[in-house]
Image (spheres, grey):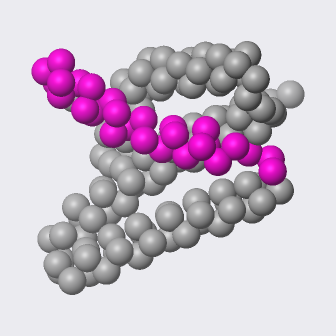
Amino acid sequence: MIITTITRKISEGERIALGELSAMLPFFLICNGLVLVFSGIYGLAGGNIGFGIFTGLLLGNIVGAFNFYLIGLSSGKLLRKGKKSEAGVRSFAGVMYGLRYFIMFAVYWILASLELINIFTSLLPLLYPSFYYKFMAFFNKSV
């Protein structure tokens, strides 16, 4: 079997987004562990926990990481376009924002209506970057 590697130059936005994601990874893992611990406690207390909690958490992490990556890509494009026209930058930012959230809403709605995910555990990882930056600012660490 021949393994081929496709290499390409990554943009500055991609590099920054991937660097930030790798720096946040330990924090994400801790948050996921806490969600699983509290879900287990809830289940032991008689609450109904099902497979949807785990699939929701997995989906939320994938969507959250991909969303953060897309923000990095679009911010790099916005910086390049900013030199050309401010109106173009605003339009591009608005379209990318709307497109990202429309796709996320559609995916979450379909999967939640099929009862494949727990909506709470799938949306919680989308807040992890915000928690991370607030946590780091509170402890006065450079982010």
Residue 77, percent from left and from top: 32, 63
Residue 90, percent from left and from top: 25, 76
* Residue plotted at (76% across, 39% down): 52
From the image, give the main secondary structure of the stretch colored magenta.
helix
* Residue plotted at (30% across, 57% down): 75
Q: Is residue 136 visible?
A: yes
Seen from the viewer's position, the closer of residues 102 and 95 is 102
Residue 136, percent from left and from top: 23, 24
Q: Is residue 41 left or right of residue 1?
A: left
* Residue plotted at (42% across, 21% down): 27
Up-down: is 72 above or below 107? above
Up-down: is 46 above or below 63? above
Seen from the viewer's position, the closer of residues 111 and 78 is 111
Seen from the viewer's position, the closer of residues 114 and 48 is 48
Q: In this picture, which residue range is highlighted in magenta?
A: 115-142
User: For residue 4, which quarter of the picture?
Assistant: top right
Task: Name the image quarter holding the C terminus.
Answer: top left
Q: Is residue 18 visible?
A: no
Q: Is residue 85 left or right of residue 41?
A: left
Q: Is residue 43 left or right of residue 135?
A: right
Up-down: is 68 above or below 24? below
Task: Name the image quarter holding the N terminus.
Answer: top right
